[in-house]
Image: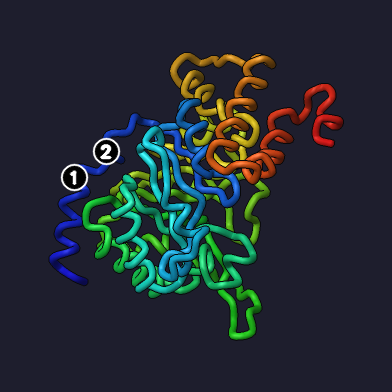
């Protein structure tokens, strides 16, 4: 470990933005093709406490690819905003974290949780959890680079190990195994998805595992997975004691879920979004997408419009 850089990073943790967030806080989880600048601004406008970028390839940043560098841009209204990076080369994590810090982000997050086939196939995301030595080296490199901003990580409940032919073995590495491997690093926060790699989006999250991570980790713990309603959020908080929640698919077409959860936790009830407000939100979102991306923004906006009006009369014809 670069002791001087590491010391500077440890000092910066004292002034971390994470320490100033309300409890519990609500976070916009990173999602490829969704959490661009427009959606992040929309989330902040609707009650999010912190937003994350789409996950960004450290290889792309290292080689200055245009899509990767575009993801290092954000609007001032997005603060606090965290850039999430993924890959499997510690040196590239060091370089990428330097660029993330220089770009003015409030934090940098390491993706050890993405289950997408393309990411896992390239030995990134949750596949890193199979190699805890690699995890440790990546965390070390990132902490050494990001001397002024906090480092956080995203993990999953577990992943099964594989043999040399890629066949799954009975053994697995869990979130607790990963936590033990990096226990001597000053990580600011951990987001844990309560489902395994093998069942990425189905079934109930493992609340017991999330609660155990909260018990063992000295920093902030953020619960993730299956958060689609205000009652889902309350249930996760009650069963795990986490410091915050990371909303992902639950906010597709309803970014105001952040506001509704805050309202429900404070008062025990929440306000449904009127039809007129949904239309106004969709128009505001579309206009912002056009300003930021031109005609390409309108093409990308189609999926959001489908989500906004899902279940409403005439939605099928509107999608056509």
**Vertical order, 153 against 263 (above or below):** below
Query: Which x, y percent locates residue 209?
Result: 48, 51
| Lateral position of residue 7 relative to residue 206, left or right | left
Residue 93, quarter of the rendered image: bottom left
Q: Nearer the viewer, residue 247 or 239?
A: 247
In front: 32, or 183?
A: 32
Residue 255 can be seen in this image: yes
Q: How many marks?
A: 2
Q: What numbered label is drawn on residue 14?
A: 1
Which one is nearer the viewer's eye here, 288 or 278? 288
Dot 1, how many residues are within 10 Å of its Cα: few (below 14), some (14-19), or many (20+)?
few
Q: Residue at x 70, y 33 (%)?
A: 305
Q: Position of residue 234 (x, y in %)?
A: 51, 29
Element class at badge 2: helix
**Residue 90 picture quarter:** bottom left
Which residue lies at the image location 58% right of the left edge and 68% below the top edge? 120
Residue farthest toward the bottom in the current orientation of the protein: 164
For image coordinates 18% across by 55% down, the residue present is 10
1 above or below 303? Answer: below
In-image side of 2 versus 83 (left or right): left
The residue drawn where x is 65% and y is 78% is 167
CB within 8 Å, label 2 to label 1 = yes
Quadrant in which the C terminus is drawn? top right
Residue 241 can be seen, yes or no: no
Residue indicated by mark 2: 19
The N terminus lies in quadrant: bottom left
């Amino acid at each position: 470990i670069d002791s001087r850089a590491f010391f500077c990073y440890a000092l910066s943790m004292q002034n971390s933005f994470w320490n100033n967030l309300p409890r519990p806080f609500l976070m916009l989880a990173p999602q490829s093709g969704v959490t661009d600048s427009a959606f992040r601004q929309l989330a902040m406008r609707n009650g999010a406490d912190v937003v994350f970028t789409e996950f960004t390839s450290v290889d792309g940043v290292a080689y200055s690819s245009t899509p990767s560098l575009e993801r290092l841009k954000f609007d001032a209204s997005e603060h606090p905003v965290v850039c999430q990076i993924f890959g499997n080369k510690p040196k590239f994590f060091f370089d990428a974290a330097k660029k993330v810090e220089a770009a003015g982000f409030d934090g940098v997050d390491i993706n050890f949780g993405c289950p997408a086939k393309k990411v896992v196939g390239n030995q990134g995301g949750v596949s890193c959890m199979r190699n805890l030595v690699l995890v440790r080296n990546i965390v070390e490199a990132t902490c050494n680079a990001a001397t002024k901003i906090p480092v956080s990580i995203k993990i999953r409940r577990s992943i099964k190990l594989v043999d040399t032919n890629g066949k799954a073995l009975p053994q697995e590495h869990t979130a607790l195994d990963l936590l033990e491997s990096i226990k001597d690093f000053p990580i600011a926060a951990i987001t844990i998805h309560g489902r395994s790699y093998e069942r990425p989006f189905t079934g109930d999250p493992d609340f017991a595992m999330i609660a155990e991570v909260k018990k063992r980790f000295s920093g902030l713990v953020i619960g993730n997975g299956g958060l689609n309603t205000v009652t889902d959020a309350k249930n996760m908080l009650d069963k795990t004691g986490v410091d915050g929640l990371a909303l992902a698919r639950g906010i597709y077409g309803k970014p105001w879920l952040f506001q509704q959860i805050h309202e429900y936790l404070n008062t025990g009830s929440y306000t449904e979004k009127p039809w007129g407000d949904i239309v106004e939100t969709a128009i505001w979102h579309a206009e912002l997408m056009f300003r930021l991306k031109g005609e390409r923004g309108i093409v990308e906006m189609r999926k959001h419009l489908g989500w906004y009006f899902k279940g409403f009369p005439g939605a099928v014809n509107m999608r056509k």
